[in-house]
Amino acid sequence: MIPQSFPGSFTDDQGTEKLTWRFVPAATRWGPSYEVRATIRGADVRGSDFDVLKPVDGHAAAAAGLRLDAYGHLETCVLSGDLPCTVERPGGHPLSTIRFTLDLREDASAPSETPLRLSIAIGGKTVETEAEDFENGLLELAAALPDGLRLRSCVTCLLSDYSPAGKGLMGIRCHRGAREQYLAVTRKAEYWPVPLTELVPETYLCGEFEPRVPGTGYRG
């Protein structure tokens, strides 16, 4: 994937800090993937997902007043950002943004089952949704877009899917490098051996996008 950067913010009991989010290609034992990075009050944080961000330097994190859970991940904060996306409409594919807000604060008396909020303002209309992850939230947004508009991204692509073993808050598997093998999948057992091209954010878009056909692959 091509690296991406976009504006966002970090909010905790000390206030709100503007920042720049970055999606950077990363190599993992499962194959090509990406990493989320940002700098908060001078402390660099990174991780495979927005809900598992860790400071690179513990002393810098302490000086910045960042709250961490037992695993060293950011907690007791709200993350937000303007994800770049492409919306197909008559006459072109203009760039747009999807606003996300992830609430990582814990309220023992009322735990949030849908900590993620997404919204997009387009076609004179603002569409909003709450979801447990980016897959469900983005598909709900896509379905609610005004007539004639269509979200053009990896989550709506013919050649993308999710592992039967589970998934995180963000990240979808691209199979453009094994197109024919992936399109032949009709059940879970046939999906496992399909080679992974790379793991990318659901809002990402490459030049080989094809609109998804219902019933394709493992996720249908």
Image: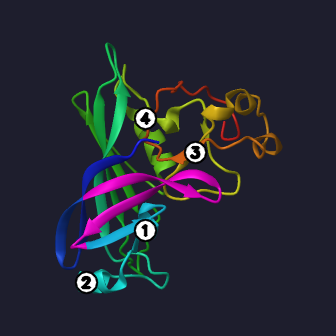
Q: Amino acid at mark 4?
A: Ala
Q: Nearer the viewer, residue 86 or 46?
A: 46
The numbered mark, 4 or 3, whose residue comes first in the sequence reads 4
Q: Visible in this render: residue 47?
A: yes
Query: Which residue lies most toward the front here?
Result: 27
Residue for badge 1:
112
Q: Are marks 4 and 3 in contact (CB under 8 Å)?
A: no
N-terminal-most mark, 3 or 1: 1
Q: Which residue is mark 3?
A: 198
Assign a secondary structure to mark 2.
loop
Amino acid under label 1?
Answer: Ser
Question: Quick one: label 2 or label 1, which is nearer the N terminus?
Answer: 2
Model colouring: rainbow
For image coordinates 21% across by 29% down, the residue present is 124
For discs 2 and 1, the disc positioned in front in the rendered view: 2
Which residue is tagged 4?
A: 142
Q: CA distance from mark 2 to mark 3?
A: 35 Å
